[in-house]
Image (cartoon, rainbow, N blue to C red):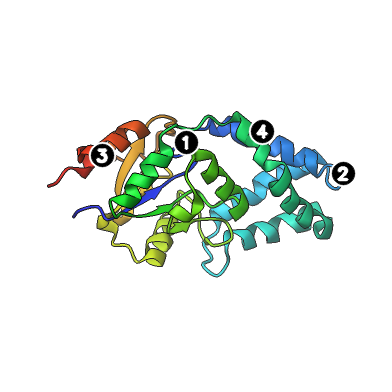
Amino acid sequence: MPIKAILFDLDGTLLPIDTDQFVAGYIRTLSEYVSHLVDPALFVKQLFASTAAMIRNRDPGKTNKDVFDEDFYPKVGNGEALIPLVDLFYAEEFPKLSAIVHPHPFTSDLIRTVKERGYRTAVATNPLFPKSAIEQRILWTGARPEQFEWITTYENSHFTKPNVEYYEELIERLKLPPEETLMVGNDVQEDMVAKEIGLKTYLVTDKKIDRGEPSYLPDGEGSLWDFYQDLLWGRGIFAEV
């Protein structure tokens, strides 16, 4: 079946970041920002624990934000003061993290081409962050949030990667036939798992992550530049059958 929709992962795919470096900088900056309300060691420990709670969640009645908030704030305390302060952090301090990001120079052209060729498209990033943080990172790529039909965030998603329910929810929301949808990502386990429900997959190798198991064979593989060239010239996964 021809591809009619393309789902893009963000970190390590459209945005070529070293995930470990970025997360370390993010957590350090955030914990310092709220340190007058919560001990940084407690904050970081609970941040990881509550993120793990989101990943484990299978309750379709709770968004990832619901799960995180219910697990995090009662355990760190000062919720009434902490919640607006965290919101302020994303407005004032989070943008400064763009200094450690070196985006591809062609990403805006890639997304423009995807749109011009008539593909439906969405940002299928792991929804562990709030909308503000994800939209900012999209801007860092050179693309714009409004170019995408949907962006998964922790406010609008009920599951996370690598759970197949994450992909099932996304394609159901967008009414996408799996066999006509392509998932593009750099993480073998979190992104290529989309094959389990029938999506085509393309593994971006610039910042490839592979934990070994489970292993999935992608339908296409190469750098994001290779992907762009295949799109432009109708090669590889875009070749006419």
- Residue 230 on image: x %, y %: 25, 37
Front residue of this view, candidates 92 and 1? 92
Residue wearing tag 4:
25
Q: Residue 196 placed where, x, y %?
A: 32, 52
Asked if the residues shown at circle 2 and circle 3 are in contact, with their CB atoms under 8 angstroms apart, the answer is: no
Q: What is the total number of numbered labels drawn onto the structure image? A: 4
- Figure check: 7 above or below 62: above
| Residue 150 image position (x, y, % from top left) | 45, 58
Q: Residue reaching furthest right? A: 36
Q: Quadrant of the N terminus?
A: bottom left
Cα–Cα gap, marks 1 and 4: 16 Å
Task: Judge whether residue 130 can be spotted in this image.
Answer: no
In the picture of the structure, the residue carrying the numbered disc 1 is 12
| Marked residue nearer the N-terminal end (2 or 3) | 2
Horizontal side of 116 relative to 160 (left or right) equals: left
Judged from the image, the secondary structure of the residue bearing numbered disc 1 is loop
Is 135 situated above or below 232?
below
Mark nearer the N terminus (4 vs 2): 4
Q: Nearer the viewer, mark 2 or mark 3?
A: 3
Q: Which residue is mark 3?
A: 232
